[in-house]
Amino acid sequence: MEMTAEQMCALNELAKVIAENNRKEAEAVEGYTEQLKAIAKVRSLFSDADVVSALDELEAETREKIADELSHSRSLNDEYTELTGIEPKED
């Protein structure tokens, strides 16, 4: 399909927005990973069963959030590839 310069520019702008959203997903994963680290530190300082139980629940919820962000990232990568036709390099 032949595209005008304006159409190509608009597609590239959309691809840029998708890439930026993917970067934000990666930042969220970094933040949640730091949260897991903090949970582990707090857990090492407490032996109270109620506190440990609450931390276990918080850790599970945090891991679920990471999984969600990774899923979003995969979806954004697929959208970028579909939009641009640029495939990830196979190693």
Image (cartoon, rainbow, N blue to C red):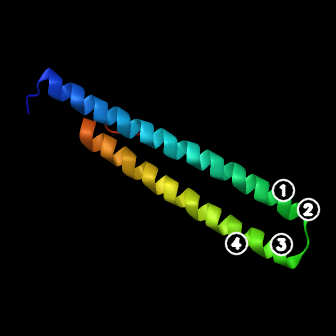
Badge 4 or badge 3: first in the primary sequence = 3
With respect to residue 89, does 46 lie above or below?
below
Viewer-nearest residue: 63 or 13: 13
Residue tagged by mark 3?
51
Q: Residue at x 31, y 46 (%)?
A: 79
Q: Amino acid at mark 1?
A: Lys
Q: CA distance from mark 4 to mark 3?
A: 10 Å
Q: Residue at x 23, y 30 (%)?
A: 10
Q: Residue at x 25, y 40 (%)?
A: 83
Question: Label 2: how many residues lie within 10 Å, few (<14), some (14-19) or many (20+)?
Answer: few
Q: CA distance from mark 4 to mark 2?
A: 17 Å
Residue tagged by mark 4?
57
Residue 59 screen position, x and y as percent:
69, 65
Quadrant assignment for the C terminus = top left
Image quadrant in which you'd find residue 63? bottom right
Question: Label 4: how many residues lie within 10 Å, few (<14), some (14-19) or many (20+)?
Answer: few
Badge 4 or badge 2: first in the primary sequence = 2
Tell me, yes or no, whether the two marked residues, 1 and 2, touch with CB atoms within 8 Å: yes
Q: Amino acid at mark 3?
A: Val
* Dot label at residue 41: 1
* Dot label at residue 45: 2
Q: CA distance from mark 1 to mark 4?
A: 15 Å
Quadrant assignment for the N terminus = top left
Can the viewer see residue 91 in this picture? no
